[in-house]
Structures are given as structure tokens and as C-alpha cells.
Image (spheres, rainbow, N blue to C red):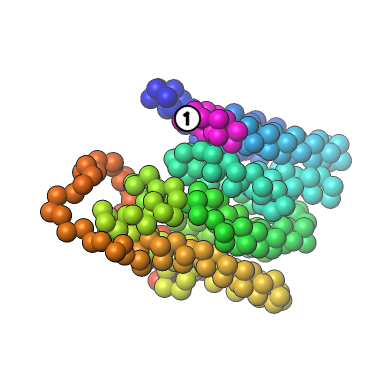
Amino acid sequence: MKPPILIIIMATIMTGTMIVMLSSHWLLIWIGFEMNMLAIIPILMKKYSPRAMEASTKYFLTQATASMLLMMGVTINLLYSGQWVISKISNPIASIMMTTALTMKLGLSPFHFWVPEVTQGITLMSGMILLTWQKIAPMSILYQISPSINTNLLMLMALASVLVGGWGGLNQTQLRKIMAYSSIAHMGWMTAIITYNPTMMILNLTLYILMTLSTFMLFMLNSSTTTLSLSHMWNKFPLITSMILILMLSLGGLPPLSGFIPKWMIIQELTKNNMILIPTLMAITALLNLYFYLRLTYSTALTMFPSTNNMKMKWQFEYTKKATLLAPLIITSTMLLPLTPMLSVLD
């Protein structure tokens, strides 16, 4: 793809998301979603192959269905309330339809089937955009309509997503599919808290985006797409293998790292609201996620090949890819735990 075309397409994707985030009128929000969806498809098909074509088609059909559902919910709401304003959702059916449409756009369970398939069929760069930037717009709308969302429906979806995100990733060797299931689980944690404390959802989304960006950038450095290709990295990038180890533990939510902050705060917030069983179940299913992250770290950083590299000269060419912003991303993805008191004041 030629650079000017790429710049125009990326600008359209960003504009679409910004329109969604800044609008309070349902029609403008819908237009923003459509702009974003139509502009992301060339990005998904950047390296053309039948697999990428299939992934893009799946993505298009899912998003188009979700947009149609959203528009129907908006129309029902318009019939009952007589206005397009986002803050006024008077009809419960309209609220349920809008919530369903937005969760379908996010890839929450039971509408999660497209996420691993689409992520696996596209390049690492496109996968990174799909699992980070594309989550911002639907989440911002859920944030704005959070007072009128059906809490029971959302909690059920969140719990199912955390379960699916844990179980689905257990048997995977493909890194993109693992990241997709990880994304489903993280979205589950975010939607669980959105009706109780929407600001905490924003904190969780920010940390999730930082951690996912860092992980994908490290995968792109060596073009690693499978666990096997990741396990070859110790010979060439010993430092980066240890970075992947720390990042995976952070994604799993282990205490001294940044990934622990959202899990800790969400469990605390849910227990404050007299919920004991749901946070307990979520914490237990988070162990499944931790298991497949640990399996990745084991194959990457904790195993050594039988033959060590004794050669003075590397057998591959020197690496020239630029790792833009990788250092600050890794630091923020792993070392933010001491800032928890400040973040809790924001909430």
C-alpha cells in the first residue's frame, strides 16, 4: 500500500473513532462507526491473501450486523423519547439492543467468535490496531450510556467473556489467537465494572491498550506468529525475551506489575457493591489466562535450546526494524503499581 493512501485510510479510522467519542447525537455516532468500519477493511487486507480476505469479510459482516442492530435500537428509542440525544434512553428494549450491538462490536461473549478468526487471518500490525484502537469507540459509547444499561445482562456477558477468554486460549499455539482470547477476557473485566464505576473501566482500557501494544510490538520485532518462532528469540534478542516474560505476567495480572491494578480495583469495587460470587469466579477464571501466559513465557524465556550460540558472528543479518516508543510502553505496562493510590483517587 502506498504511503499517501495509508495515511488517508489511517486518518479516516482515527476520525471515525473521534466522531464517535465526541458526539452526543446518535446519527453522528452511527456515521462515525461506519467510517471507522469501512476504513479498517483495507488495513486488514494490507498483505493480500485468501486468509486476509476471509478475515476482512467476517469482520465486515459482524460489524455491519452490529451497526444495523444499533440503528434499530436508536430508532426504537427515537419513537419512544422523540430525541436523538445519547443521554436519554427511555425504552428498555432499545437499551438492550444498543448494548447487544456494542458488545458485538467489542467481541464480547456470546458474540466473540469473530475475534480469534479475524485476528489470526491478518498481519501483526493490523491485529494490533484491531485489538487496541478498535475497542475505544464502542467502549466510549458504553461509558456514556452506562446509567441506562441492563446490569444483569452486562454482568452475564462479562462473566461469559472472562470464561471464554480463559478456556479458548488454553490450547492455542498461534500468538495472534492467544492475544485475541486475552482481549475477550479483558473486555469481560471492563464490562463487569462499567455500570458500577465507569471511570475504572477507562483505567482498565488504558492499561490493556498499553500492555497489548507493547506485546504486539515485541512480536513484530522478530515477526513471531507462533510459540515456536517465539522460542527462537533467546538466541538473537536475550533481553527482549525477558521483556516478553514480564509483559506476559503483567497481562495475566500478577501483583508487582501494572496488570494487577485493574483486577485489584475491579474486585474491590464489586465487593463494595455486595457481590461476592461474581468477582470470585472472575478471579478464578483469570487463572486460566495466567496459565497460557505462563506457558508462553516458559517456551520463550525459561527454556534453552540444546546447542548454545558459540559463534562470534551472527548467522542472521543485523536487525534494522525500528522499535518506536517500545521502552516507555514496556515501562508503563509493567511498573505503574506504585501509582495505584493516585489512580484510586481519580476513581
For this view, does 37 lie left or right of residue 316?
Answer: right
Looking at the picture, tell me which residue is in the foreground, 220 or 40. Answer: 220
Instruction: Judge left or right: residue 257 versus residue 151.
Output: left
Image quadrant where residue 301 sits: bottom left
Q: How many marks?
A: 1
Residue 31 higher or lower than 148, as above or below: above
The kind of residue tagged 1 is Lys
Report the predominant secondary structure element of the magenta stretch. helix
- Decide whether residue 31 is among the magenta residues: no
What residue span does the magenta drawing correspond to?
A: 39-55
Left or right: 195 as drawn, with respect to 340? right
Whether residue 259 is visible, yes or no, is: no
The residue under the point 50% across, 54% down is 173
Percent coordinates x, y for residue 120 in the rendering: 54, 43
Label 1 Cα neighbours within 10 Å, binned few <14 / some 14-19 / many ≥20: some
- Name the residue tied to disc 1: 46
Report if residue 245 is visible in the image.
yes
Check if residue 42 falls in the magenta segment.
yes
| Residue located 39% across and 51% down the image | 229
Residue at the (50%, 43%) spot, across then down: 127
